[in-house]
Image (spheres, grey):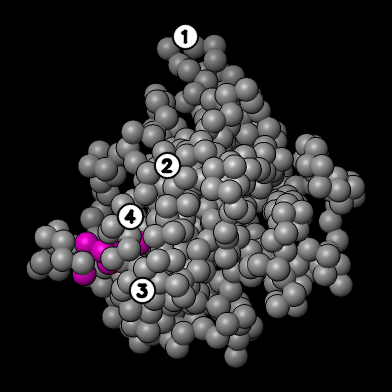
Amino acid sequence: MGVSFPVGWRAMGGAFTRPRPTPHVPHWTWTRWRSSILVAALAIAALLLSACSVEQFLLPTSTPSAVQDSQPQRTSDPLVPTPVPGSEAEQNEDEPELSEAGAVKLADFTPAALAEPYSTRWRVGVGVPDGKSPLIYAWPDSYPGWYLNWSVGHLATGNSGSPVDVAPDLVVPPDDEAGMAFAPMVRTPRGKLTPDADLLAATVAQLPGRTWLIGNEPDVRWQDNATPEEYARAYHLAYTTIKEADPTAQVAIAGLSQITPLRLEYLDRVWDFYREEYGEEMPVDVWNMHAFVLQEKADDWGVDIPPGMPEVTHGMQWQIEEHDDLELVAFQVELMRRWMREHGQQQKPLWITEYGILMPESYGFYPGVVTTFMLDSFDLFEKLRDPELGFAEDEDRLVQRWVWFSAGYDLYPTGDLFTRDGAPKQLMLALAAYLDTRDP
């Protein structure tokens, strides 16, 4: 059965013209109007004050950064996507309880069995920020079947003869001890591998049969911040290193921050440069995307313009109130799947390795709104099917696996599943109840 999308989107026919965002906004209430009006009033007032800058009201995105020097030069805390390590912004007011060794105490629980492929639990994943172990959280009986932590899990420093001591909360446990499968990520800041190729090879040898994610949002200046050419070279080095160390490994391309015509132009440049540089089609085992709904505008809130595209000033003009619009999420999935089909990649898996709600509660994204968005998104990803676009091995589904952002991250806490001391929030309990109804 085909997927139903808003009128006009299928008519794009792969040309990737830039449609206007839908005026439909789920959960839109007077309360949210009032919040938006207040925010707008504050912004106008700030413009009238010589001591203030409009930049104080900008809101960027998302996830932990790989490098310090790729941070945009902004003037106010809300503009710093991630705190510089060791900075005052990084320190918690309420520090977690520590063991005698100075490490965060790990949660004591009985792990679930690893999820069966293509079960709902196998599909649902979670991001565990800051390279942490999932065992720092008190998981309920039902919980996601896999996770990533934006790193290779410090297994290299912990197990490859490095003199660096790693705290237990930074050591990824064996999958069966966590009851979750770990998806390692190699970072590619400015086209450089982190860890480097030698350390990566040693790590891969310890983790046979994994799917390796190569990079995180290279299209975003405060994430991996790589031009298409830089990313293509980094991907080639990572791919060849991983396959030589473990021929059974799978390799996934980096997730771009969102899928839009502008971001697909970036991906086109990666794809084309790889072919020109290496004389072959870019080898990708698993395709990957992120699915945020954010503005694309230079030096403004949102995800800005991808590196290496100085001629572009703006792309999609999505607004804050559309941040939880699942029609726009579905639109992105179809765009990505159309791109895959046109490049001979349809019969490969597509993962969404990051999505969720980044905007603060004060903008109208209250806990009930976030819960509804999360659970409805799970239903959406399960139901999106199209024989013309989908993965035949998975009953023509467009999306195979996805990762909610996040278990807990101070800078973007709206979608947190846990409190700062590791206790499950209502959002986590709602996720657990959802899994209980899907995988008896």
Name the residue carrying label 2: 191
Q: Is residue 156 magenta?
A: yes
Looking at the image, is 422 positioned above or below residue 326?
below
> Are the residues flagged by discs 3 and 4 in contact, CB closer than 8 Å?
no
The amino acid marked with disc number 4 is: Ala
Looking at the image, is 358 positioned above or below residue 266?
below
Q: Residue furthest top?
A: 50
Q: Nearer the viewer, residue 55 or 134?
A: 134
Q: CA distance from mark 3 to mark 4?
A: 15 Å
Q: Magenta residues, as a range?
A: 152-159
Comparing labels 2 and 4, the label whose residue is closer to the camera: 4
Label 1: how many residues lie within 10 Å, few (<14), some (14-19) or many (20+)?
few
The amino acid marked with disc number 2 is: Gly
**Label number found at residue 136:** none
Q: CA distance from mark 1 to mark 2?
A: 40 Å
Give the left or right position of residue 313, taking residue 56 as reference. Answer: right
Name the residue carrying label 3: 207
Label 3: how many residues lie within 10 Å, few (<14), some (14-19) or many (20+)?
some
**Label number found at residue 50:** 1
Looking at the image, is 280 positioned above or below residue 136?
above
Does dot 3 land on a helix, a strand or a loop? loop
Q: CA distance from mark 3 to mark 1?
A: 56 Å
